[in-house]
Image (spheres, grey):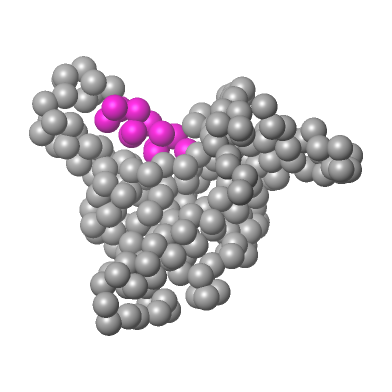
């Protein structure tokens, strides 16, 4: 197994930094304490300093802290999930379990940050192939901003978790939150002070890497 912390050329400080990165976890249970505004600002600043295609910074952030807004969003997304699972002919108990879990994850988080992308400042091409690539570049850029926020949360002793659910109902999310037309929801990040601890593993690097 390849271990990035076990390189003979790595300094002790490098070992420490890599080990710190490896200690980040997806936290889904939070204490009731709210996240202070100054920490929210630091999280968003970290996100906004991610690399992006052409440095166009296509990310857009919708910050949600109010309980009523969380309830509206969770309810709307839950109804869509219920409808989708019902159409899939999923067992009723599974439908109830999944919709309830989704609602709790959204409403119990002290802070939600919805990551969206906008193509407003990206390049435009006359052919669909290059235009699709440009959109993919915006998606990748927005994802890197989200990763920056996840790492910043970890550095600030906060827990956070990535939820991809907005991809399944982007128009519904936009309507519920009254977002600008050009904003395309990509992911919902839940944030708060952790109320759980986790241990995780990873597949050996040798199973995921080719050297050429």
In this rendered view, identify the residue nearer to me: 3 or 176: 3
The residue located at (21%, 17%) in the rendering is 93
Residue 201 visible somewhere in the drawing: yes
| Res. 202 image quadrant | top right
| Res. 159 image quadrant | top right
Residue most extreme to the front: 212
Q: Is residue 134 left or right of residue 97?
A: right
The residue located at (38%, 54%) in the rendering is 186
* Residue interval drawn in magenta: 98-109
Residue 63 visible somewhere in the drawing: no
Q: Is residue 115 above or below residue 201?
A: below
| Res. 62 image quadrant | bottom left
In this rendered view, identify the residue nearer to me: 139 or 158: 139
Q: Position of residue 182 (x, y in %)?
A: 31, 70
**Residue 99 located within the stretch drawn in magenta:** yes
**Residue 105 located within the stretch drawn in magenta:** yes
Q: Is residue 100 above or below residue 61?
A: above
Q: Is residue 106 above or below residue 201?
A: below
Locate the N terminus by quadrant: top right
Q: Position of residue 108 (x, y in %)?
A: 44, 34
Main SS of residues in magenta: helix
Q: Is residue 125 left or right of residue 32?
A: left
The residue located at (38%, 77%) in the rendering is 120
In this rendered view, identify the residue nearer to me: 52 or 34: 52
């Amino acid at each position: 197994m390849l271990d990035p912390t076990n390189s003979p050329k790595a300094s002790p400080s490098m070992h420490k930094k890599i080990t710190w990165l490896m200690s980040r976890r997806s936290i889904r249970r939070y204490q009731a304490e709210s996240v202070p505004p100054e920490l929210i600002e630091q999280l968003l600043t970290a996100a906004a300093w991610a690399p992006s295609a052409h440095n166009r910074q296509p990310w857009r952030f919708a910050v949600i802290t109010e309980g009523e807004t969380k309830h509206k969003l969770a309810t709307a997304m839950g109804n869509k999930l219920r409808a989708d699972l019902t159409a899939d002919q999923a067992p009723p108990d599974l439908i109830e379990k999944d919709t309830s879990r989704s609602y709790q994850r959204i409403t119990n988080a002290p802070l939600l940050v919805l990551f969206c992308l906008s193509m407003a400042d990206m390049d435009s091409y006359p052919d669909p192939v290059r235009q699709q690539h440009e959109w993919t570049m915006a998606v990748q850029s927005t994802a890197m901003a989200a990763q920056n926020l996840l790492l910043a949360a970890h550095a600030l002793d906060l827990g956070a978790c990535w939820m991809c659910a907005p991809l399944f109902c982007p128009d519904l999310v936009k309507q519920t939150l009254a977002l600008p037309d050009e904003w395309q929801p990509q992911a919902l990040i839940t944030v708060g002070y952790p109320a759980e601890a986790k241990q995780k593993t990873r597949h050996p690097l040798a199973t995921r890497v080719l050297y050429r």
